[in-house]
Amino acid sequence: MAVASIIGLIAASKWIDYTKRFYGTSVFICWIVTLSATALALIVQFHLQFYIVFIAATLASGSFSLLGAVGIEYSVEMTYPLSEGISASLINVATMFFGILIITIGQLVKHDLAMYSTYAFAGVLLLASIVMIFIRPQLRRVKIDHHDVDSYKKKTVQYK
């Protein structure tokens, strides 16, 4: 599972660095995470064979790690005047808070209702995916980088 996550993270990082398509990549990965969480919940509920559960869990864990990495990169782009350390730290704190909250709620649920918590998690991911569509990106760092390159090109043309 870890190898699938590492390969996915490297591929997504190269894709974002090459294309600078933070918004489209984030929306795509958010929907992939939602679909993989739903598929994993259904596969576990119907008690399918172990190798099918393993493949679904590998896909789900790989997409979950992609969501975290791409989400941090996207938030750093949208909050450019702030330093990257502050933006990434705030995202990590929020992730830890919600992780603790979900784990605590999951422990309070009786074993008979544990499957419903998996569907609730998939529902939260679906809601996040829908909200993600309506967020319009303001890629401030990319705009400033392009502005700097354009102004540099104009200055070098004037000096020739």
Image (cartoon, helix red, strand yellow):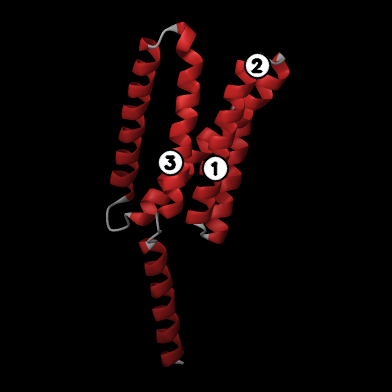
> Which comes before the other along the chain, label 1 or label 2?
1
Disc 2 or disc 3, which is closer to the eye? 2
Dividing the image into 4 quarters, which one contains the N terminus? top right
**What residue type is disc 1 on?**
Trp
**Do labels 1 and 2 touch, CB within 8 Å?**
no
Q: Which residue is mark 3?
A: 128
Residue 110 figure quarter:
top left
Q: Nearer the viewer, residue 42 or 77?
A: 42
How far is the residue under mark 1 from the one under mark 3?
Answer: 9 Å
Mark 2: few, some, or many residues within 10 Å (few <14, many ≥20)?
Answer: few
Could you say where residue 130 lies in the image, as x and y percent from the top left?
46, 46
Disc 1 or disc 2, which is closer to the eye? 2
User: Element at badge 1?
Assistant: helix
The residue positioned 40% from the left and 16% from the top of the image is: 106
Could you say where residue 63 lies in the image, as x and y percent from the top left?
56, 36
Residue 31, which numbered label?
A: 1
**Do labels 2 and 3 touch, CB within 8 Å?**
no
User: Element at badge 3?
Assistant: helix
The residue positioned 59% from the left and 32% from the top of the image is: 36
